[in-house]
Amino acid sequence: MSAIAITTPATKALFQRTQHVGDIPIVGTYTFASACHIEASFNGGAYVRIATLSSGTGQPYSGTLSAQAQGQGTLTVRFEEDQATSASVTLIGIGELLVAAGQSNMSGRYTNPQSVSSTDGFTAVEYNDAGVWATLADPYTADTSSGSFLPRLATLLMNTYHVPVGVVPAPPIGGTGWTSWIPGGSGHTDITTLYGAMNVRMAALGSIPRAVMMWDGETDALVPRSQAAVQADMNTFVDAVYADRGAKTMICKLQICTGITDSDTAKVRAAAAAVWVGNAHALTGPDFSDMMSDDAYHFITDPHCQTVAQRWADALLPLLTSPSASISASPSPSVSSSPSASLSPSSSTSPSISLSPSPSASISPSPSPGSSLSVSPSVSPSISASPSRSQSPSASESASISPSASASRSPSPSPGLPRASPDTGVIC
């Protein structure tokens, strides 16, 4: 009697696309009385042979379903010689995969949990602290019991680029400065360290994420530390991530923290700016230096949450719209069927961006200091987990970047996301 099973990927797993396609590594077990072949199909596409095998009982198989169109749907494997015997996993995605690292502003301290919506019916996902693929929802990591900007960021990206989005908490941990994220030990896989836990988690993803988003440095400014010391730690982290996992790191410039002398925070910002320019494995991140924290260190209001998500989206835009944008092919991440361990902790202004992918979706620029976000009440579309959504490349993925960095920025509403009222008095 024949039998086949899929061990990985698990339901809701998401793989990084390169341009408009991505690869799905598949691992499982099979039983077949004679030599056989296994073929696979994603999201209703054609079946493609992924493995040629001898007879066996409960034996492992592996293969890769390559160059599949971006989207989210069902993955199915079957025998070529016995097509009635098959196995399927739902809500597999090919889209944008982002790692979230740093301290408390990355894990989130917003008063209200945030929600996700997709006009295409995609389910935003996360590879959570337990090493399990799940629906993205606040609180998305154990370091917080409140809201984060990640659901809003996922909504912006999904509704502009029409691809599913996945988030991987590194995990971010409040109060951890740059020294806490320095790799150590053989292979950088000590899961009792922040870097080791992140590295092991990234190794289990099956693809190289678009970027590691890093929000850190408030603790360094509190000490305070010199620009040179912080910059050295940033470079060490950025280089290690690229060497170990092939991903580039996007560091943000810190906000004005009312609980920290800003001249000390400025040293951390200067370090980030220097790394942006001087390290080929670093990406230019969002600049929050014109925004003031709601409490001593954190953003906590919904209007600030929207602005933060918008600026991360704007920073990611050049990576997502460039026809030549691709993920580094080296090193190849290992595919692991075991969950990653959970962790118990022992500039210059960006150019204004005008994006008009379609009448119903846009990433709009963040407001300049003193401006307010325009009111545009809208009903967020509900999300439906459609197992058969396929998105082919279209002209909607285009953007124009104005060369002027000093132009006044007046944001237009993004779909499904509430905008701040002019009378909120938010400093941003």
Image (spheres, rainbow, N blue to C red):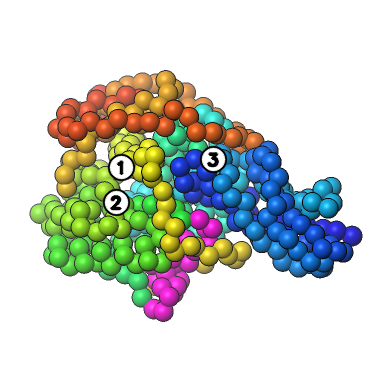
Whether the residues at callouts 2 and 3 have beta carbons within 8 Å, the answer is: no
C-alpha gap between disc 2 and disc 1: 9 Å
The total number of labels drawn is 3
Residue at image x 70%, y 52%? 49
Which segment did they paint magenta? Answer: 185-207
Report the amino acid beneath label 3.
Answer: Gln
Q: Distance between the residues labelled 2 and 3?
A: 24 Å
Which amino acid lies under the numbered mark 1 shown in the image of this protein? Ala
Q: Mark 3 points at which residue?
A: 70
Which residue carries the number 2 mark?
A: 283
Q: To which residue does mark 1 refer? A: 315
Residue 275 appears in which quarter of the rendering? Answer: bottom left
Residue drawn 33% across the image and 55% down it: 249
Question: Which is in the foreground here, disc 1 or disc 3?
Answer: 3
Label 3 SS: loop
Q: Residue 109 carries which label?
A: none
* Outermost residue toward the right in this view: 1
Q: Mark 2 near mark 1, Cβ–Cβ under 8 Å?
A: yes
| Lower position in the chain sequence, tag 2 or tag 3 | 3
Residue 206 horizontal/vertical position (percent): 54, 58
Which quadrant, please, contains the N terminus? bottom right
Q: In this view, does 55 lie above or below 152?
A: below
Q: Earlier in the sequence, mark 2 or mark 1?
A: 2
Q: Is residue 317 above or below residue 176?
A: above
In the image, 302: left or right of 187? left
Q: Is residue 37 visible?
A: yes
Residue at 41% of width from left, 48% of height from top? 326
Dot 3 crowding, Cα within 10 Å, few <14, some 14–19, many 20+:
many
Which residue type does callout 2 highlight?
Leu
Q: Can residue 305 be seen in this view?
A: no
